[in-house]
Image (tube, helix red, strand yellow):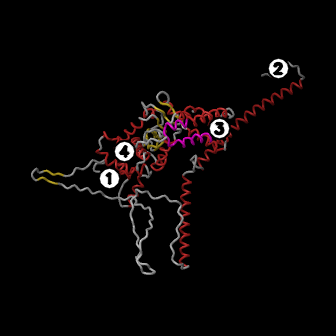
Amino acid sequence: MDFAAELTAFDLPPALAQQVQRWVAQAADVARLEAELKLSKLKIEALVHEIATLKRLRFGARSETLPAGMKDLFDETLAADLAACEARLEALRDAAASEAEASPKAPPERPRAGRPPLPAHLERIEHRHEPESCSCAACGQDLVKIGEDVSEQLDIIPAKFFVHRHIRPQYACRHCETVSTAPVPAAVIDGGLAAPGLLAWVTVSKFVDHLPLYRLEQIARRSEVALPRSTQSEWIGRIGVALSPLYARLVEHLLAGTVLHADETPVEQLDPGRGKTKRAYLWAYRSNTLGADPPIILFDYQPGRGGQYPQAFLKGWKGMLMVDDYAGYKALLGGDIGELACMAHARRKYFELHQANKSPVAAEALRRIGELYALEEQARDVSIEARAELRAQYARPRLEAMYLWLVQTRKTVADGAALARAIDYSLKRWPALARYASRGDWPIDNNPIENAIRPIALGKKNWMFAGSEAAGKRAAVIQSLLATARANGFEPLAWLSDTLEKLPAWPNSRIDELLPIRKKESAQA
């Protein structure tokens, strides 16, 4: 706009016209400065939020609820110090009592803090402690048993190596000139040194207890047993191949379900050509935790993170897929596959914002999401029909109210702010976020698969990287079966020992009997 030209139309005195022009220029400068100040405030807010998040990740706990690793270590150290102080205090009291030559009395009972009883299935070894004499020390009369005091202590025998010695007598027929002997049963490793129990121990130690093979070698060396890492690696490879049919059958059972969780985690793979490692991915899939199907956890090792890998794994599958906002899943969604979005991911945006600057809007969002999770906790052990009714009566009205609140709140938040990004994430995915409440068997979040992946993250710190793509796929087979066994309540070592013993001669028509899955009991309304 040309203010000088318009001012001439009013025929103002020159001095007044110049003053008006100066006022207009000042107003333009004020508007420009206000815009720059607003932009600066947004940048400062974003940087403060980013710095607070990085500080929390670097110096604080990573969990959204309770502190993790360092707190556990501190608690263990504190418990050890308290126990040591109590032991020293008891020793001082005993010494003071002996110096005072007090009359012999029964030691006072220490207050117990409700220690739970030891498991009933454990073997009991009884030790009977009879008095030195069955006569009264005061009058010499015979003592009469009126009861007994029973206390239990827990003990352990560490890894104990022993040898199975198989003796097969040979019998000859002098008439036929033939020799007969008992046949050698089939084994996972024909003519191998290791029995199924040892193979299972090495496998479970590596993939469940996350012990590197060199540590297992050191453990065996303490018993003067040679278990080279190269030998253990060969065992792991053969076990992965032997268990592949069970893995393939688990895939069929998993894809028979209509609701799946999916996620992925990076792993390092050795790249011999460059002398370095390259990034591969372990894609994870889990059956529905709210359905009637048994829990099944499967890992699919692939060299990349492209969307073609879940497309290939889920080819022909129809149902609802619970995933995060990663673009690799987008090509799957639509048509035969519907989307369920993770409420925990949306909550995490507000949690990080509240941790950074105590935002009252973030606190309100957390409160509303907390009400939804409280309803899920109440419906944890009810039937699918009862859960659907609870969600329809209580969750859906809260979801509708939260959506309207987010829409109205977003109008008051400047674009580019951290709070705006958190709200935009929820609004963009809102249909998929709220979809779970329309039925009783759809999950609210993707936490079950994230919990299944968490042990993999711990294991990566110990085994560092996969030697090759083939090794990664074999490891995925073993990890899938052991994770499924644990999810179904099987003791991994016992299940794997029994399976490796039966598998070589087991008919393929009965392979389902070896799978580590149990059918769920239907919940009561």
**Are dots 2 and 1 in contact, CB under 8 Å?**
no
| Residue under label 2 | 6
| Residue under label 1 | 195
For label 4, the SS is helix
| Residue under label 4 | 240
Q: CA distance from mark 3 to mark 2?
A: 44 Å
Q: Is 388 contained in the magenta span? A: yes
Query: Mark 2: which amino acid?
Result: Glu
Query: How far from the left and from the top, in percent, is residue 34?
Result: 75, 34
- The numbered mark, 2 or 1, whose residue comes first in the sequence reads 2
Q: Looking at the rendering, in which quadrant would you find the N terminus?
A: top right
| Residue under label 3 | 419
The residue furthest top is 9
The residue furthest bottom is 139
Image quarter of residue 344: top right
Instruction: Mark yes or no: residue 468 visible.
Output: no
- Which residue is at a point 53% across and 63% down the rendered structure image? 112
Query: How far from the left and from the top, in percent, is residue 399?
Result: 59, 35
Q: Is 147 contained in the magenta span? A: no
**Are dots 3 and 1 in contact, CB under 8 Å?**
no
Query: Mark 4: which amino acid?
Result: Gly
- The numbered mark, 3 or 2, whose residue comes first in the sequence reads 2
Label 1 packing within 10 angstroms: few (<14), some (14-19), many (20+): some
Range of residues picked out in magenta? 367-391
- Depth check: give the residue in front, 11 or 346: 346
Q: In the rendered view, would you say 416 is above or below 173?
A: above
- The numbered mark, 3 or 1, whose residue comes first in the sequence reads 1
Query: Mark 1: which amino acid?
Result: Ala
Query: How far from the left and from the top, in percent, is residue 255?
Result: 42, 35
Q: CA distance from mark 2 to mark 1?
A: 100 Å
Label 2 packing within 10 angstroms: few (<14), some (14-19), many (20+): few
